[in-house]
Image (cartoon, rainbow, N blue to C red):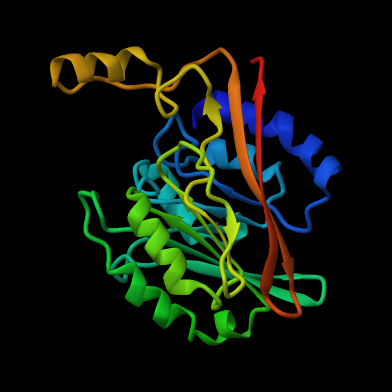
Amino acid sequence: MGRIGREGMTAILPKWREQYAPDSVIVNVENMAHGRGISPDTMAEALRWKADAYTTGDHAWDNKLGFELLNDPKYRLVRPANYVAGVPGRGWMTYSLGAWQVAVINLQGQVMFKNDPENPFGAIDSILHEPEVAAANIRLIDFHAEATSEKRGFGWHVDGRVSAVWGTHTHVPTADGQVMPKGTGYISDVGMNGGHHSIIGMDTEGPLRAFRTQLREKMTPPESGPIEINAVLFEIDPQTSQCLSVQQLREILPG
């Protein structure tokens, strides 16, 4: 979320790589360019994190400078798959992790959104039959949605058919990480990487004025102060495709 969110990622990711030794890293970047979309400069910074995939959400198209990046496979970007054909970008990607194949899928919910993507429940049923996705040992979903009920429902819908599904979009981490009965790792929301003294990543004054007056206000991410970093660590058995454990990671940096 904005510049200080990027700075937090650059600071914490090497530490967490050393501490937890993850085999793969996936980062959601949809609010990276001053809180709205992506840009060439911010993606150049993000590529230094060496993630295996960069997921997005409904703000993926907020910055027109990012459209060409979404179409360029070298950036390893994924946008919500349940949008109409012809929208820039791709809805899933696959990559090799040693002897195993990993599929990363991005989907957006429908509840409380102004735009109207295709029903994600039906969309995932089709995507899981795509040959590349079906052949993957590990199938992962970033489910970008507002309502926790829709996120929970989606988790139950895919339980046993994917290795893990995590929620993004609301910027507030939830405490419901679990391995579901059929082996899918789940959490309703990972949380954000951005200003800790903020309202979901935005400087507090703009949102507070809007709440007080009911008028539209300019909202921008803070440029300084403490930074909160949130992530989720899934342990997955590639032979069974099932999740073994879910661990929430959270750290506040002084900024």
Check the image and report above or below for 62 versus 70: above
Query: 76 or 239: which is nearer to us?
Result: 239
Splitting the image into 4 quarters, where does residue 119 fall?
A: bottom left
Look at 37% across and 41% down and name the residue there. Answer: 63
Q: Is residue 190 left or right of residue 241?
A: left
Query: 150 or 14: which is nearer to us?
Result: 150
Look at 61% across and 59% down and name the residue there. Answer: 74
Outermost residue on the left side: it is 214
Question: Where's the C terminus, which quadrant?
Answer: top right
Splitting the image into 4 quarters, where does residue 134 fall?
A: bottom right
Check the image and report above or below for 211 versus 191: above
Q: Is residue 203 left or right of residue 237?
A: left
Q: Position of residue 133 (x, y in %)?
A: 56, 79
Q: Is residue 200 left or right of residue 94?
A: left
Query: 52 or 255: which is nearer to us?
Result: 255
Look at 68% across and 78% down and name the residue there. Answer: 137
Outermost residue on the front side: it is 181
Q: Is residue 118 left or right of residue 254?
A: left
Q: Position of residue 135 (x, y in %)?
A: 63, 85
Asked whether the viewer can see residue 90, the reply is no
Query: 71 or 23: which is nearer to us?
Result: 23
Q: Position of residue 25 (x, y in %)?
A: 69, 52
Asked whether the viewer can see residue 55, the reply is yes
Splitting the image into 4 quarters, where does residue 227 fall?
A: top right
Q: In this figure, what is the number of numbered marks?
A: 0
Look at 27% across and 62% down and name the residue there. Answer: 117
Q: Position of residue 223 (x, y in %)?
A: 51, 15
